[in-house]
């Protein structure tokens, strides 16, 4: 059974504990680049940010995409492969809250990719 994570901070902290934070951010950067979006964290900046700072940057970027570049937002969701059924659980309160909930979904899906790759590359 896969572990469940309460929020995005738990995902990043787990990735840090397992020394996979770099792999997680690399996967996220790769998906951003695949659709010609600039990743909100430069590689040199990553070590300067805490987990909360990384989440904040990602949330801000998702908010921008949601409000200003909705087509790019949809492309990102497709590229990251967030299941459509997950969006049914998002409460449409305001755009900031939605961006926070989507941030969690994106990080959770990217973490699944990294975790599976790590698990099956070792065998």
Image (tube, helix red, strand yellow):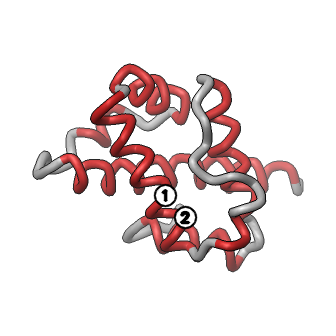
Q: Residue most toward the left? A: 93
Point out residue 89 in the picture as x, y percentages from the top left corner: 21, 47
The quadrant in which residue 18 appears is bottom right
Which label sits on residue 75?
Answer: none
Residue at the location (78% across, 55% down)? 118
Kindly identify which residue carries mark 1.
Answer: 57
Give the Cα separation between the discs numbered 2 and 1.
5 Å
Quadrant of the image for the C terminus? bottom right
Q: Do the residues labelled 2 and 1 touch (CB within 8 Å)?
A: yes
Nearer to the camera, 78 or 59: 59
Residue at the location (57% across, 69% down)? 12
**Left/right of residue 60 with respect to residue 10 in the rendered view:** left
93 w.r.t. 2: above or below: above
The quadrant in which residue 37 appears is top right
**Left/right of residue 67 with respect to residue 46 in the rendered view:** left
Point out residue 97 in the picture as x, y percentages from the top left corner: 23, 56
Nearer to the camera, 74 or 112: 74
Kindly identify which residue carries mark 2.
Answer: 54
Badge 2 marks a residue whose secondary structure is helix
Nearer to the camera, 49 or 22: 49
**Left/right of residue 43 with respect to residue 36 in the rendered view:** right
Badge 1 marks a residue whose secondary structure is helix
Mark 2 nearby-residue class (10 Å; few <14, some 14–19, many ≥20): many
Residue at the location (69% across, 52% down)? 42
Marks counted in the figure total: 2
Point out residue 86 in the picture as x, y percentages from the top left corner: 31, 42
Mark 1 nearby-residue class (10 Å; few <14, some 14–19, many ≥20): some
**Left/right of residue 13 with respect to residue 27 in the rendered view:** left
Point out residue 115 in the picture as x, y percentages from the top left corner: 68, 56
Residue at the location (62% across, 24% down)? 36
């Amino acid at each position: 059974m896969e572990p469940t994570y309460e929020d995005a901070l738990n995902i990043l902290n787990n990735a840090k504990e397992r020394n996979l934070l770099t792999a997680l951010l690399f996967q996220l950067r790769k998906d951003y680049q695949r659709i010609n979006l600039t990743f909100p964290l430069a590689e040199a900046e990553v070590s300067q940010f805490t987990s909360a700072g990384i989440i904040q940057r990602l949330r801000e970027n998702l908010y921008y995409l949601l409000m200003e570049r909705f087509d790019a937002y949809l492309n990102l969701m497709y590229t990251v492969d967030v299941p459509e059924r997950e969006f049914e659980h998002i409460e449409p309160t305001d755009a900031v809250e939605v961006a926070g909930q989507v941030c969690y979904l994106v990080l959770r899906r990217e973490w699944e990719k990294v975790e599976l790759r790590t698990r099956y590359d070792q065998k």
